[in-house]
Image (cartoon, grey):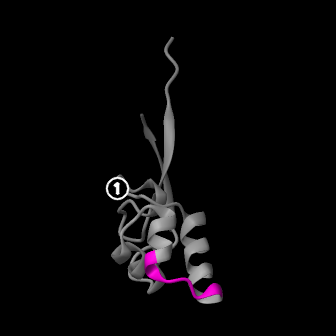
Amino acid sequence: MPVKKYKTIDLNADGNRCGESHPIAKLTWKEVDAIRDAREEKGLTYRDLAERYGVTLWCIRDVCNYRSWCNRPVYEKRIKI
């Protein structure tokens, strides 16, 4: 009997994937929190943070300004892989 494999994905209030479980996510929640802390507490530039985390300047700007990664997941769903 084959073993069924599942993974848990995060969903927002609209039922769409969000956060780390989004198919094109390049960051984790831990990294997002670290980016925001570094920007607010240490005053690092968007450019410094973008180079450190391997994402674009605009990605960092949107994370720091809560345009992206602004809501924690509301639901979790198990899907087959």
Residue 39: percent from the left, percent from the top? 56, 84
Residue 46 part of the magenta-drawn span: yes
In the figure, 40 relative to 24: above or below? below
Which of 27 and 22 lies nearest the eye of the viewer? 27
Residue 36's image quarter?
bottom right
Where 63 sits versus 30, above or below? below
Identity of the residue drawn at 51% across and 11% down: 1
Judge by depth and name the residue closer to the eye, 26 or 47. Answer: 47
> Residue at (41%, 71%) from the top-left corner?
13
**31 is within the stretch colored magenta:** no
- Compared to residue 9, the image places residue 1 above or below, namely above
Left or right of residue 68: residue 6: right
Number of marks: 1
Which quadrant would the C terminus be assigned to in this image?
A: top left
Which residue is situated farthest in the top direction here? Answer: 1
In x, y percent, where is residue 76?
51, 56
Q: Between 72 and 47, which is closer to the camera in this rendering?
A: 47
Local SS, label 1: loop
User: What residue is pinned by disc 1?
Assistant: 24
Q: Position of residue 9 (x, y in %)?
A: 47, 52
Residue under the image location 37 percent in, 63 percent down:
15
In the image: residue 27, left or right of residue 14: right
Find the magenta span and give its range. 42-47
Tell me the residue at 52%/71% (across/down). 72
- Amino acid under label 1? Ile
Q: Is residue 19 visible?
A: yes
In the rendered image, residue 63, in percent from the top left (x then y), is placed at 45, 77
